[in-house]
Image: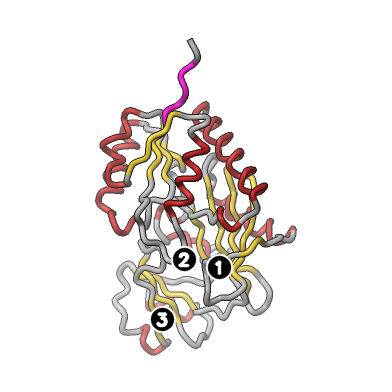
Amino acid sequence: MPAARPRLLYVTDLAYPARGRRYCDEDIHLTARLREAFDLALCHPLDAAALMDGFDAVVVRNSGPVIGYQQAYDAFRERALAAGTRVYNPLHGRGDMAGKQYLLDLTASGHPVIPTVDRPEDLHRLPESAAYAVKPKAGADSIGLRFLAREELAGLSYGGLLVQPRVDFRYEVSFYFVDDRFQYALHAPDPARRWVLEPYEPTAADLAFARGFVDWNTLDHGIQRVDACRAPGGELLLVELEDLNPYLSLDRVPEETRERFVASFTDSLHRFLAA
């Protein structure tokens, strides 16, 4: 008898209307390839808690912003942790998986991140800017994002909000990792078109920047996307550390890169299940 193949529950919202992206295409492609190595079923994030007991691991992919189903996600986390269910990415991530607190922590520790505060008494720590970005700590996909002048910040109710200077960046760039292995980078040459991405050849300094945040996050397994912007002075600043369900923009990379990513993803899942 052949050995039983691992059973994966792949969590995705195929109908999520992402601006400039097609979640469904990416997950259809990935699951078609993963079926070569695993027994696999897809489910909506609202169904994950009820279905996960019959699988060896739960793989959370393009499941949409958690803020849209926070209660169900919290119940899923609680049940998975109590049962010892293997979840990929593992649930102890320190980036977006845990909200935006990491932006405050990284600012306080002097990391190269867009300066971030969450209290009116800390506004003096932010550099002067023509406008300031105000966003919810639990937000994602620009949900709840608005831009205000400095004189408008004093009147905010700061519960659950973050404030950052609006950086006049040259472009955004994203670095994609599987476990601690760099896979590829993409950048948006036009700041006004975030998801019109092109392949980007990172320098050694760029990779050191990105790898520093992957190391800080201490995830032994999983997919991470380090989003950064090129500031006017030429330095990179962290925008987000996506470690819950980062979209991968695989349609924007050459076929060889895409195949290499799929192989790395498959290998990572095997090692995760064997750990």
| Mark closest to the chain's N terminus, 3 or 1 | 3
Q: Main secondary structure of the magenta part?
A: loop
Amino acid of disc 2: Gly
> Residue 110: in sight, yes or no?
no
Tell me which residue sits at (28%, 39%) in the image: 49
Tell me which residue sits at (37%, 61%) in the image: 17
CA distance separating discs 1 and 2: 8 Å
Query: Relative to the observer, which residue lies in front, 28 or 239?
Result: 28
Image coords of residue 240 (percent x, y): 50, 62
Residue assigned mark 2: 20
What mark, if any, has residue 196 been given in the picture?
Answer: 1
| Mark closest to the chain's N terminus, 1 or 2 | 2
Amino acid of disc 3: Phe
Image coords of residue 56 (percent x, y): 41, 28
Image coords of residue 51 (percent x, y): 29, 35
Which element type, helix, strand or loop, lies under badge 3?
strand
Question: In the visual, does 203 lie left or right of 257?
Answer: right
Query: Tags 1 and 2 in contact by the CB under 8 Å rule?
Result: yes
Tell me which residue sits at (28%, 54%) in the image: 69
What mark, if any, has residue 23 been given in the picture?
Answer: none
Residue assigned mark 3: 147
Nearer the observer, disc 2 or disc 3? 2
